[in-house]
Amino acid sequence: MGQEEWILSLEDNEWPLTTINHDRMIARAIVVDDEGYFYFVRANRDDDFGKATLIETAGGGVEAEEDLDTAIRRELKEELGADVEVLCKIGVVSDYYNLIHRHNINNYFLCKVKTLGDKHLTQDEIEDFHLSTLKLGYEEALVEYERCRCTSLGRLVANREVPVLKRAKKLL
């Protein structure tokens, strides 16, 4: 391929920086189907970050023994019930959650849905985040990210994900 990896570095301007004491390796995906619809998760949170309703790409932490490909396939199966074809890596977004002293290394992939089935959500995802699936067109997704910018966490997530969604659209 020979192309430079796309990297976006963001800061957390929502909460004061005191200390960053851990990194979290994350695998996330822009998931699209044959009709051009995109799949996201909706989270309704009320935690340290405050009350927030968010749109977010599916994905999560990479476990110790996993490579990124295994992690993204597992996360998409768990959160969306999706078996996917990984089309390509979109890039990496480095961002921070100052409130919980964390540096996130978000590895984004562009994935195509092969099949949708049962989700396998964790107790936290069910009880604390109330995760559900959103199926949206590209423009609808951009509008939804804007709508969720009314909270600090919503702004952090939108700042991270809107550029990735726009890049994914170009790659398609």
Image (cartoon, rainbow, N blue to C red):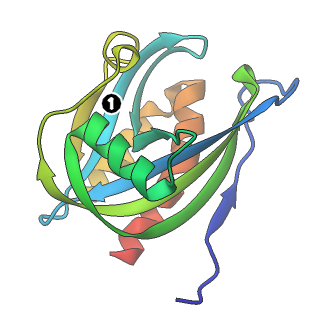
The residue nearer to you, when weighing 35 against 86, is: 86
In this rendering, the answer to whether 43 lies above or below 166 is: above
Q: Is residue 96 left or right of residue 127?
A: right
Count of labels in the image: 1
Query: How many other residues sit within 10 Å of disc 1, few (<14), some (14-19) or many (≥20)?
Result: some
The residue nearer to you, when weighing 7 against 12, is: 7
At x 43%, y 61%, the residue is 109
Q: Is residue 90 left or right of residue 160?
A: left
The residue nearer to you, when weighing 155 against 36, is: 36
| Extreme residue toward the bottom, this view | 2
At x 36%, y 20%, the residue is 125
At x 71%, y 28%, the residue is 14
Is residue 47 visible in this depiction of the protein?
A: yes
In this rendering, the answer to whether 152 lies above or below 163 is: above
| Extreme residue toward the right, this view | 18
At x 53%, y 44%, the residue is 65
In this rendering, the answer to whether 144 lies above or below 69 is: above
| Extreme residue toward the front, this view | 65
In this rendering, the answer to whether 91 lies above or below 134 is: below
- Mark 1 lies on a secondary structure that is strand
Is residue 57 visible in this depiction of the protein?
A: no
Q: Is residue 51 left or right of residue 94?
A: left
The residue nearer to you, when weighing 171 against 81, is: 81
- Say what amino acid the circle numbered 1 marks: Arg
Give the residue at mark 1.
42
Residue 118 appears at what percent x and percent y?
14, 34
Residue 3 appears at what percent x and percent y?
59, 85
Q: Quadrant of residue 7?
A: bottom right
Is the C terminus in the top left, top right, bottom left or bottom right quadrant?
Answer: bottom left
Residue 83 appears at what percent x and percent y?
21, 52
